[in-house]
Image (cartoon, rainbow, N blue to C red):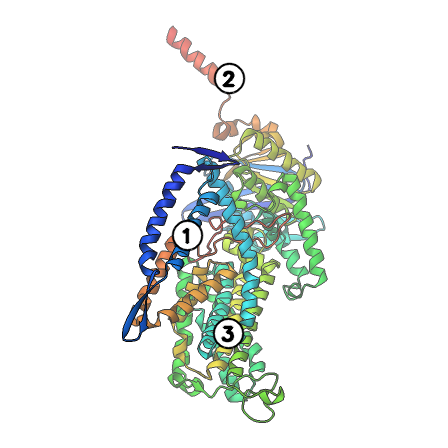
Amino acid sequence: MSVDIENPFLTVEHLNMRFGGLLAVDDLSFDVGGRDITALIGPNGAGKTTVFNCITGFYKPTEGCITAHHPDGKKYMLERMDDFKIPKTAKVARTFQNIRLFSGMTVLENLMVGQHNPLMVASNFTFGGIFGLKGYKDAEREAVELAKYWMEQTGLTKRADDAAGDLPYGDQRKLEIARAMCTRPKLLCLDEPAAGLNPRESDELNRLLLFIREERDTGILLIEHDMNVVMGISDHIIVLDYGKKIADGTPEEIRNDPSVIAAYLGVGDEEVDEVEQEIVEGAGQ
Amino acid sequence: MAQTSSTGGRQFDIGKIAKDLVFTALIAVVIFGSTITFRTVSAEGGLALVSRYDIAFYVIAAVVAGRLLLWIFFWSRVPVRKEEKKTTLKERTTALREKLGKGFAPVLLIFAFVFPFLPFVDRYLLDLSILILTYVMLGWGLNIVVGLAGLLDLGYVAFYAIGAYSYALLAQYFGFSFWMCLPLAGILAAFWGVILGFPVLRLRGDYLAIVTLAFGEIIRVVLLNWYQFTGGPDGISGIPRPSFFGLPFRRGEGNFADFFGLDYSSTQRIIFLYFLILALALLTNFVTNRLRRLPIGRAWEALREDEIACRSLGLNTTAVKLTAFATGGMFAGFAGSFFATRQGFISPESFTFIESALILAIVVLGGMGSQIGVVIASVAMIGGFEIFREAEQYRMLIFGLAMVIIMIWRPRGLISTRIPSIFLKKRKAVSGDMVAQGEGH
C-alpha cells in the first residue's frame, strides 16, 4: 500500500454545490493521491455523485476550487474547464453509475471512440484521413493495439466484434472502465463500479483496479457501497454525510471511527448480539 | 398409413403421395382440360373448334411431375424439433441475406451504369431515373445527419434550395459555369449548415426537430420575398446547362456530338445528366463510407448512441454536431446545383416542406444509417409515385397506407441492421434493436 497523499494529483478546496435551496455539497476539501485508490463513501444522498459531477465538469460548482496537478508541473483548474476538455487535457476520465455505453456499436468501436482525440489529430481533422494518408493508418493500427490491450486486461477479447449492448452486465461495467482507460487518463473516476456485480465479478474488478494503479500509473477515485471493494483495495477513504466530510483516512482509521460507524457503517454483528443478549436477560429478570 | 419408407432424413408416405397426385391430376384436368384442349380459330364462314389433346396432356403431366418433385425434395423432410428448427432457419435466412446483401450492391451498380444504354429505356425512364438518383443522393446526405449523428432534421430541403440558388444566382450575376459553381454551392450549403447548427446545439428531441423545420421555412420564405435578388415567386430561368469538359450539348460545330463525330441527339444531354447525378450520388456514398471509418464518423455514431458518454470521453460534441450538419448540408448543396442545371428554372415552390418530409421518409423507410436501404426506398417511393400516377387523388392514400404497413412490418426500416465500422476478426451486423435513434425520435 502506497499512500501518495503527500503528493496529491487532485486537490478539492472548499467545494460548495447548491441546487436551489439544497446545499448538496457543503465546504468539502480533500486531496487525491496520484497513485492511490481513493474511495468516496457515504449513505445514499450524501452528495458523492454530485462531487463526481463537479470534478468531471458535468456540474459547475457554486464555490470552490478543483485543481489537477500533473507530474510535469502543469496545473488545471477543473471548475473552469468545459466538461469535454477535462478528459482531453486534464486527463481525468470517468464512468457512470448507470452504465453509458454506445450500445449499438461493437466493443472495439467503443474503445476506438475513447481514443477520438489523438486519432482526430492523426487524421489531420479528417482531411488527411479521407485520402487515406499513411500517418492516419499507422495511428489507427496503434489505437487498435491499445484497444486490444485493454480487451485482454478485461477479458473481452472474444467479444470484440459484438455489440456492447449484447454483453452481460458485468462485462458492460468492465468495458466502460476499459473505454475510460483508452483516453489514457491520469486519474480514473469510477461511480459505483461494483454495483450489480456478483462476488466473483467484484473480485475480478478489484484485481483490475489494482492492475490499473500498478501498471498504468493511474490514480483511482471511486464511489462505492460494496465494502469488500472499498476496504479490500483502497488506500485512502473519505466519508461524506449530508454533503460534509465526516472522516478522512486509511481503511483502518475509518473502520474504527465512531462517527462513521454511526452515520454509515452501523454496528457490527457481535455488538448487536450483545445488546440482544442484554435485552433478553433484562426481560428474564 | 399404408407404406412408409425413410431414407437419410427423408420420409415418404407413398399412399398419401399417390392420393395427392391423383387429386392434383384431377384439378389440372378440370382447369386445363377446357382451356387448353379446345381452341377457337377463325375459319371460313365463322369459327371452328380445334382440339389439342397432346398439349393439354403435356401441361397436366408437367403439373403432376412438378408436384411429385416437390414431394420428393421438399415435403419429405423429417420435421426437426421445433426449437432447433427455429434457430437454424433464422441462421440460414441471415446467412442467405448476407450473401445476397454482398452481391446486391455491385449488381445494382453495374445495372446503374448500363441502364441508359438498355434498348427499352426511353426519355421518360431516363428522366425518372435521374429523379430517383437525385433523391438517392439527398437521402444519403440526410442519412449523415439523421442516420449517423441521430439529429432529426426536418428542414433538409433548405440546403437543397441553397445549393440550387447558389448556382442560379452565381451564374446569373457573374456568369460562372456549372463546374465552378458546384463546389461553391456545396461550400455555401455547408456554411449554412453550420449557421443552423449553432442555435440547435443545446436543443434536444422535439425542440431540435421544430427548429430545423423552422429553418427550412425561413429559407423558403426569404427566397420567396427577396424579389430584387432572387426573383421571388417568378423564380430564376435561363440557368445555363452543364457542358462536357467545355463542350456544350447543342447542335452545330464545336459541340459534343460534333467533337466525337456522333449524330446530334437530345438524349445525349439527358444521358450526360444521368451520369452526372450518378457520379455525384456515388461520391456522396463513397465519402460517407469513408467518413464512417474515420474518427469523425465514429464520433457521429457515438453521439447518436449517448451524448453524455461522448463528453466524458473528451469529444467536443459541438464540433461533432456542426460537422454533421455541414457535411449533410454540403451534399444537399451539390444535389441542389444539379437540380438547377437540370431544370434550367427554379422557384421557391420546388423547396417546400413536403420535399423535406419525402427525403426523411426515404431515410426512415430505408432504415436509418443504411446506404442500400436508401436506394431501395428511393426507388420504391419515387418509382411508386409514378406507377400510381393514374390513381390521381388516391395516390397519397395508397402511399400513406403502404408506409403504415411497412412501418408495422419493419419498424426500424427495410434494412435495420448496422454494419460496424471496424472489426477485429469478423464483421458482424449489429441488430437494429441495439442501435439508438438519437435526438428527436
Q: Are marks 3 and 2 in contact (CB under 8 Å)?
A: no
Front-lying residue, B59 or A48: B59
Front-lying residue, B218 or A154: A154
Residue that appears at 54% across and 52% down: B98
* Residue located beneath label 1 in the image: B61
Which is more foreground, mark 3 or mark 2?
3
| Cα distance in 3D space between marks 2 and 1 | 92 Å
| Cα distance in 3D space between marks 1 and 3 | 57 Å
Residue that appears at 38% across and 69% down: B387
Instruction: Tell me residue B57's x, y (percent).
Output: 39, 55
Query: Can residue B237 be seen?
Result: yes
Looking at the rendered structure, the kind of residue marked 3 is: Ala
Instruction: Tell me residue B70's x, y (percent).
Output: 45, 47
Relative to B190, say whether A188 is above or below.
above
Q: Are marks 1 and 3 in contact (CB under 8 Å)?
A: no
Instruction: Tell me residue A142's x, y (percent).
Output: 70, 52
Report the side of A71 relative to A54 (left or right).
Answer: right
Query: Can residue A234 be seen?
Result: no
Quarter holding the C terminus of chain A is: top left
Looking at the rendered structure, the kind of residue marked 2 is: Glu
What crowding class fits label 2: few (fewer than 14 Cα within 10 Å), some (14-19), or many (20 or more)? few
Which is more foreground, mark 2 or mark 1?
1
Query: At numbered mark 2, what does the secondary structure look like: helix, strand or loop?
Result: helix
Looking at the rendered structure, the kind of residue marked 1 is: Ala
| Tags 2 and 1 on a common chain | no
Relative to B85, say whether B318 is above or below.
below
Query: At numbered mark 1, what does the secondary structure look like: helix, strand or loop?
Result: helix
* Residue located beneath label 3 in the image: B335
* Residue located beneath label 2 in the image: A270
Q: Are marks 2 and 1 in contact (CB under 8 Å)?
A: no
